[in-house]
Image (cartoon, rainbow, N blue to C red):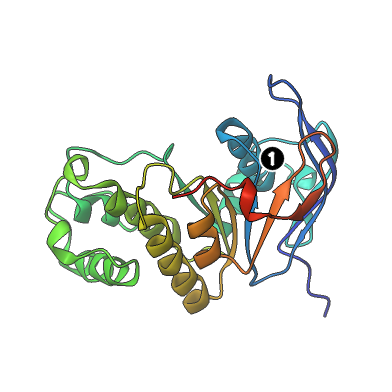
Amino acid sequence: MTSHPAVEMRGVVKNYNALRPLRIAELSVTAGARLALAGIDAAGAEVMLNLVTGASLPDEGEVRVFGRRTSDVSDGDDWLASLDSFGIVSERAVLLEGATLAQNLALPFALDIDPVPPETIVRVEALADECEIAREYLSQRAGDVPPAVRVRVHLARAIALRPRLLLMEHPTAALEGNAGAAFGSTVARVCDGRTLTMVAVTQDLQFASAAAHDTLTLQGATGQLIAARRSWWRGR
């Protein structure tokens, strides 16, 4: 049985009202690998993730996820079903700021979260432990917790329903100091424990070094991906 790469992009061009389109000449991510991509700004990162999830199709080229072309997704129901394969960590994901962290972490499992059912609390606490969220935060409002905790909440919700591919969109942009490295170590442990493939768009060297097996930098003009050089990274 042939094992397909988790993500393949070939000759991809996508215009998104920037100075130039997003170009990916060739990318192949082996299932189980953890890859960091540098050289892509916030707007480009959103476009990149949309291409991988099939929310957007390339203007040129081809995107395949676990061997299936995103252009072959036949209708809305098919696309919604395909989203089960993805866990997405992004500041664009909505947290209920007035709800507790426990209620936010319960949402993937239950719509009735006031109060959170006892059987769901068990799953919430397991997620919190896995993503290194101290249990003392679970009773706090999401709007009151620090950025280093918020990003772990995004991670926990992303993995809650056991996706195959973890996509991350500048996850540490709001963090300071060594928090990016600490979060990267958490991500690596979570991915290893769940045999998750990871693709993270980031400019944070410390996060990438801790989270990823490999780091590539996109050359915007050509779409070529090359091994990242430390001098190109924004220090933390």
Residue farthest toward the front in the current orientation of the protein = 231
Q: Can residue 160 be seen in this view?
A: no
Q: In which quarter of the image is the N terminus?
A: bottom right
Say which element carries label 1.
loop
| Residue drawn where x is 38% and y is 64% of the image | 182
Q: Is residue 1 visible?
A: yes
- Location of residue 218 in the rendering, given as x and y in whole percent from the top left corner: 73, 45
- Locate residue 33 relative to residue 74 in the image: left or right: left
Identify the residue position indicated by label 1 in the image: 75
| Residue drawn where x is 71% and y is 63% of the image | 6
| Residue drawn where x is 79% and y is 68% of the image | 4
- The kind of residue on which mark 1 rests is Asp
Q: Which of 179 and 51 is in front in this view?
A: 179
Q: Which of 45 and 195 is in front in this view?
A: 45
Q: How crowded is mark 1: few (under 14 residues within 10 Å), some or many (20 or more)?
A: few
- Location of residue 78 in the rendering, given as x and y in whole percent from the top left corner: 65, 47
| Residue drawn where x is 22% and y is 38% of the image | 97
